[in-house]
Image (cartoon, rainbow, N blue to C red):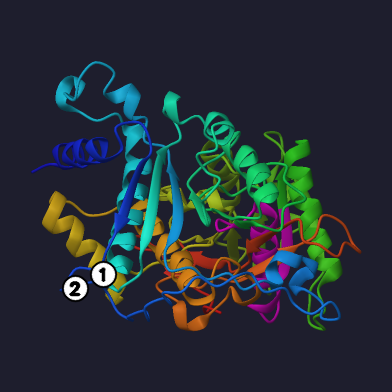
Amino acid sequence: MNRSRTITRLVISVSCLILIQACSVLRKAPAKTDGPPPVLNKPKTEEKKPEEKKPDVKAPFNVPAFAKEVKRSSYNVAIFAPMYLDSVFANSLDIPGRTMPRYVLPGLEFYEGAQLALDSLSRQGLRLNVLVFDNKARQADVAALIRNRQLDAVDLIIGAVSTPELKQLSDFAKQKEINLVSATYPNAAGISDNPFLLIGSSTLKSHVEAIHDYAQKGFANKNILIVRRGTAFEADIATQIKNAYEKMNYDKKARIREVVWSETTTDLQLTQYLLTDRPNLLIVTALDELGAKTILRKLATQKATYPMHIFGMPTWDVMKFKEPEFAGITMYYSSPYYNDKTDIYSKYVIDHFKNVYKSRPSDMAFKGFELTYYFVKLLAQDGVYFNKDINKPGNRMFTSYNFQPVYAKEGDEVPAYFENKNIYIIQKGDSADFKMNSAL
């Protein structure tokens, strides 16, 4: 059975559950459990009233809500995913042409991964009331959901959302003091005042800081260059790298030089920056494939004379560099997510997709599973306000999270948001990519 047909089965099953509107499902633990370990302890059955910390004890991160202990016998969780079901099933449950539009698949697989995590946790005894929203459906407009008070009783929101939904949900979460996990969008969307926002897919600023850190510490002798085009956007990336250099407390750090590249850049101009006696570490700030390959073709002409290591942006993870001129160039990119799919949780997800859909899950399915499992497990362990102990090594699945407070400006006492700062440096290979730095 091909992937299109298996995804069709997934869409139809999802549409029946959601039917464009949110569906509420009370999950109870059946007699038999086959979900992945470790097994959670059952939450306490009695409702606990919020307990404020003593006035003389400082609240975690200066957020009073984080000092409360709020545990429940069951929890209300909202899941948002962009599934576009009202577009696909505009007239009937039949899929036009029997082929699913490609734009539908990421949101569907994120939802299926999240659903699998919730099923696993409910089999371990956790009682959940789950609200699922297709945030690309007209009837599930975020502003309307908020206006109609459909999210008022929610204890946790997990969303594969971008703008403008992220900002709308963030404003609501801040007002209601509800933790909001932004699962896949690598941007703060202009949000600078919501300590209840948790960004799982790290921002570009965090990526370039991590790339700089690895370049400085991963090589003994090195010549570090920033290769950027003459745009304001790439100039800003270069500034972020130079700021990371200034803040870095490392006695062996090498100075950074900047190369402003253009179509008219000559080999002579380029080689003035390169050295023959040590690795040349070139951080290329181009996010687009055409721009990245244009720069790499120019650099490739010098690879026989000058040893090079090319560091690209996080968008390079999906780029293919199979052209002959790129052979022999060592390339890296950064990512907050790495999964070699050998652990018990990954095998559980793979087996589920194989048995139910006769296909392999995408990374979006793994992300939906992992983020949902991780944060709902925190909810079960520590209650509604789990923020003071958010990075638990014992909860690790296949990604290591390192959520840290981010402040809008120096001297602020309350975080602008929390962000996953664990960035993997990954080397591109011919058939597979390889993680270079260790997990936290």
Where residue 214 sits: x, y (%)?
A: 64, 72
* Residue ranking furthest to the right: 411
> How many neighbours does mark 1 have within 10 angstroms: few (below 14), some (14-19), or many (20 or more)?
many
Give the residue furthest to the top. Answer: 91
User: Dividing the picture into quarters, in which one does residue 307 lie?
Assistant: bottom right
Specify the amino acid type for callout 2: Asp
Please state if 410 lies on the left or on the right of 293 as rendered: right
State the residue position of label 1: 123
Q: Of callouts 1 and 2, which one flags the residue occurring earlier in the amino acid sequence?
A: 2
SS assignment at label 2: loop
Closer to the camera in the image, 374 or 265: 374
Image location (x, y in percent) of residue 375: 48, 65
Inspect the magenta stretch and tell me whether residue 306 lies in it: no
Q: Which residues are magenta?
A: 199-226
* Residue 34 image label: 2
Q: What type is the residue that disc 1 sits on?
A: Arg
Q: CA distance from mark 1 to mark 2?
A: 8 Å
Image coordinates for residue 64, horizontal then vertical, percent: 76, 66
Q: Nearer the viewer, residue 52 or 190?
A: 52
Marks 1,2: beta carbons within 8 A: yes
Residue at left offset 26%, top offset 63%: 349
For residue 137, above or below residue 412 = above
Say few, some or many: other residues with alpha carbon within 10 Å of mark 2 (under 14 / 14 to 19 / 20 or more).
Answer: few
Residue at the image point whose x is 37% and y is 81% from the top: 41
Give percent across and percent down for residue 355: 12, 58
Mark toward the viewer: 1 or 2: 1
Instruction: Please identify the residue farthest to the left as the structure is shown.
Output: 1
> Does the rendering let one see residue 183?
no
Q: Which mark is residue 275?
A: none
Q: Is residue 252 left or right of residue 2?
A: right
